[in-house]
Amino acid sequence: MPKPNLLILDDEIAICKSLSFILEDDYEVYASTDPDEAIALFSHVAFSIALLDLRLGMRDGIEVLKQIRSISPRTIVIIMTAYGSIPSAVEAMRQGAFYYAAKPIDIHELKVLLEKAMEQFQLQSRVEWLNEEIQKAYDVHGLIGNSAQMQNVFSLIDKVKNIDSSVLIMGESGTGKELVARAIHFAGDRQKQVFSTINCAAIPANLIESELFGYEKGAFTGAVARKTGIFETANGGTLFLDEIGELDIGLQSKLLRVLQEKAIMRIGGQKEIAIDVRIIAATNRDLKKEIQQGKFREDLYYRLNVIPILLPPLRDRQEDISSLIQHFINKINERMSKQIKGIEPDALQLLLDYPFPGNVRELQNIIERSIALADGDRVTVSDLPGDLQTKPAQPADSKLVPVYVGETMDTIERKVILSTLQAMDGNRRKTAETLGIGERTLRDKLARYRAE
């Protein structure tokens, strides 16, 4: 792991040099005798800790402290001061300093103080991170819907939020799989712990193992220090494995072992490390087909698929589109400082008729673009992307059944059967003959459609 950045600001160059030498093994040390130079460093260096002398020649250390706190409120500032200036150090603490170190500096005491300062910095960073994650959890950017399919998803989230069993979320790209994973985590008992994400498709196969499990120093060429893997950093919390279908087949066996043993071993390590991590995986692939093709382990599939959640494509829940549009208008208005009140009926109809191959994510992008370009207080047809502004002409007596990329065979079959039945004026015998199936088969399928 990279060393934390530490700033030393003292007007005595000898102190800067001696402290730099003592602390350089544990910190990335920057030292300066010039307050203006030190302040300028904050523009491109994120300092975890600053050691600040209270007496800086003609400059008042308290004023420099205020500048540091203003520029970088997360930096933990420790004041260095002569023993006779302790009251001034107390005043510095009132202004936001973490603590003080009396001169002459006791190196052992300073190192202990620095360790406590790092603990404070990490705790502060964790609190800020959790606040950001909670905001993301409650600002779901599209995980809404009144359709029966989405109500079923919400019900499943509520049922599994406090269960540690693995969850497999399935659905096309853009349907909101990560949003569901976040909702499960932040609604449940683990909400105050870490929610970590790794995209199995975005990291090269030769790197993802070290990202997952970490490695020991010297495990391979270039391993100059120990690296903690994402399983360890997520301990106690939730790990979201996005695009799990892309995971290398060799790593699948290692992941299976982690799920079975609840322990990991760093690359080059000699002992197992017990972990308590809830696994939520997601895929837009048909993993059963991947199993048949030898691309995905069947035993891992069943380990992950303890609780399956299927996210429907947006085209199959048309009744949610209006709500989603208004949701995005409200959110984007706030971000862009716009005052868009809604969408014109003809523009809405064009969106209702659109198949959305990119699902909710595509709808959000369309609304964001439209709001950015809108001149009035409502989204109009002219604000929509050009390819959406005109409906394709349909023959008056059209016998075409629309089929979209990504639709399941079950969905396509259903469309064809129901459209053919309608074309045959409800005559089941003619429908069965036209489709080349038995009447009993047709009757069973129609009965299933009514029950769904």
Image (spheres, grey):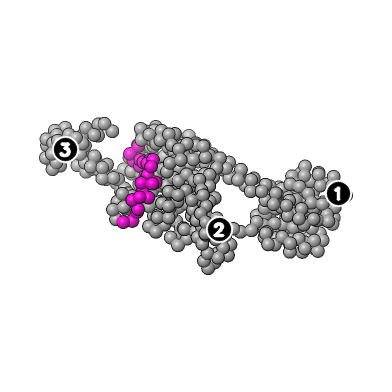
Q: Specify whether residue 284 is in view.
A: no
- Residue 227: mark in rendering: 2
Q: Which is nearer the N-term, disc 2 or disc 1? A: 1
Q: Residues within 10 Å of mark 1 (few under 14, many from 20)?
A: some
Pointer 1: what residue? 85
Please state if 378 lies on the left or on the right of 312 as rendered.
Answer: right
Magenta-drawn segment: 294-320
Residue 29, percent from left and from top: 70, 60
Going by the image, does 402 lie left or right of 195? left
Check the picture and name the quadrant holding the N terminus. Answer: bottom right
Closest to the camera, between mark 2 and mark 1, is 2
Separation of marks 3 and 1 at Cα, in angstroms: 92 Å
Residue 302: in magenta span: yes
Q: Closer to the camera, 8 or 237?
A: 237
Where residue 93 sits, quadrant-wise, is top right
Secondary element at tag 1 = helix
Q: Earlier in the sequence, mark 2 or mark 3?
A: 2
Q: Earlier in the sequence, mark 3 or mark 1?
A: 1
Q: Nearer the viewer, residue 373 or 102?
A: 102
Q: Amino acid at mark 1?
A: Ser
Seen in the picture, residue 366 relative to 42 is either above or below; the reply is above
As measured in the structure, the alpha-carbon distance from the residue carrying label 2 to the one carrying label 1 is 43 Å
Residue placed at 39% from the left, 59% from the top?
A: 250
Of the pair 445 and 20, the residue shown nearer to us = 20
Name the residue beneath numbered marker 3: 441
Residue 323 rendering spot, x and y as whole percentages: 42, 34
